Amino acid sequence: MFRIILASSSPRRIELMSQVGLEVDSLRPVADETVLRHESPRKMVARLAREKALSLAPADPETASPRSRTLIIGADTTVVAPDGKSIFGKPRNRKDATRMLRALAGKTHTVLTGYCILEISRKPKTHTRVVNSKVRMRPLSKQQIARYIDSGEPNDKAGAYAAQGLGMALIEGISGSYTNVVGLPMAQLLSDLDSIFGIALFGRSPK
């Protein structure tokens, strides 16, 4: 028996887990998402994923039941601008969303998702991984950007767009994991649950 706690209130991540048949308890994590000085985008998403998972862990792992397993999965997704350095999180306002979409339009950018799997036991086990995907956005006019922002979809999305929503009309192509762009790289996550934690959705993977 095992229980999975998803340290996220993201409907997109919850849906991805549900689509592969994994029932999860979704809880809102506590994490300061401020970017640290001189912190690379990869290190940032890995750190935040760990912090989110750890924020829901019991203070005393000795209280963990020896008869059941509890895994906490924390995740953080960010968009790295075409310059390879600037981090595009959730836009603060309309002006910020416009700035991001203008920078992404007609260019290729990177989407990074870090996830941390934490097993709560008397001997806790953790595993953190960062997955990247390349996204090519088509050229956009000022009017197209304004209309997309009018839809409200960019408001709570890293990079000010959603690949699984209206934003799919903005994307010319994706290299790498599509679900990574949505919020969780499912193939990689399921592989790690199998090979590291022994939880296999489709049976054990070949060695």
Image (cartoon, rainbow, N blue to C red):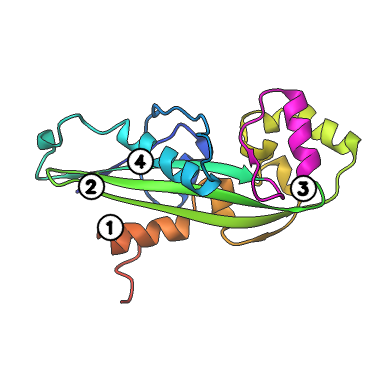
Query: What amino acid does circle 3 point to?
Result: Ala
Over which residues does the magenta segment extend?
Answer: 81-104
What x and y, as percent, mark residue 143?
Answer: 90, 34
Of all residues, the one furthest to the bottom in this rendering is 207
Whole-number angstrom distance, CA of label 3 to CA of label 1: 36 Å
Query: What amino acid does circle 4 point to?
Result: Val
Whole-number angstrom distance, CA of label 3 to CA of label 2: 39 Å
Residue 101 among those drawn in magenta: yes
Whole-number angstrom distance, CA of label 1 to CA of label 4: 14 Å
Badge 2 marks a residue whose secondary structure is strand
Residue picked out by circle 3: 169
Q: Are marks 3 and 1 in contact (CB under 8 Å)?
A: no
Whole-number angstrom distance, CA of label 3 to CA of label 4: 30 Å
What x and y, as percent, mark residue 72?
Answer: 31, 41
**In which image quadrant can residue 56 be found?**
top left
Residue picked out by circle 1: 199
Residue picked out by circle 2: 2
**In which image quadrant can residue 31 be found?**
top left
